[in-house]
Image (spheres, grey):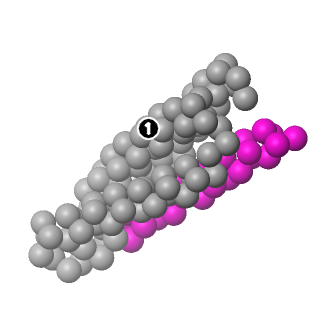
Amino acid sequence: MDSQQIIKISRQYNKCSLWVVAAAALIMLLGISICDAQQLVNPVLISVIYALVTNWAYGLSWKAVANSSPNTLSKFYLAASAIRMLAGVLVAVVFCVMNDDREAIINFIIVFSAFYIAMLVFDGVFFARQERKRNQ
């Protein structure tokens, strides 16, 4: 891959991940509105911020690794997923420590997990397609 392709893929990743986060947030907010579950607004907000920050960092990191050593991208995918998981666990633990309401914690974990899984599936599909194109 040349530098222009890497920049194009990085921009495409950022754009698509933003759309996925926005779509997930809108679906959640629609569900909150329909079910009148206002207690889920803060978990959605925290999950959106987490997803945006981690996707931005993931995109920048991927771009740097793809430019410097594209042969190690498979190791990058594994390491970045582990770091993202640890960051997610840290966010969940901090939320649990800051709240003493059991229902709020359960609601947060459900919403946060939904966002986490959506982003995990998106990353897997997006980069699997990119690797398939690169290997052809």
Residue at position x 61%, y 36% in the image: 69
Residue 3 picture quarter = top right
* Residue 86 screen position, x and y as percent: 36, 62
Q: Main secondary structure of the magenta part?
A: helix
What is the three-letter code of the residue carrying label 1?
Trp
Depth check, front residue: 120 or 58: 58
Does residue 8 appear in the picture of this structure?
A: no
In terms of secondary structure, where does tag 1 sit?
Answer: helix
The total of numbered circles placed on residues is: 1
Query: Mark 1 Cα within 10 Å, few/some/many (few <14, many 20+)?
Result: some
Depth check, front residue: 21 or 134: 134
Does residue 61 appear in the picture of this structure?
A: yes
Residue segment shown in magenta: 110-136
Residue 88 picture quarter = bottom left
Examine the rendered structure and indicate whether residue 102 appears above or below residue 136.
below
Residue receiving disc 1? 56
* Residue 96 screen position, x and y as percent: 20, 71
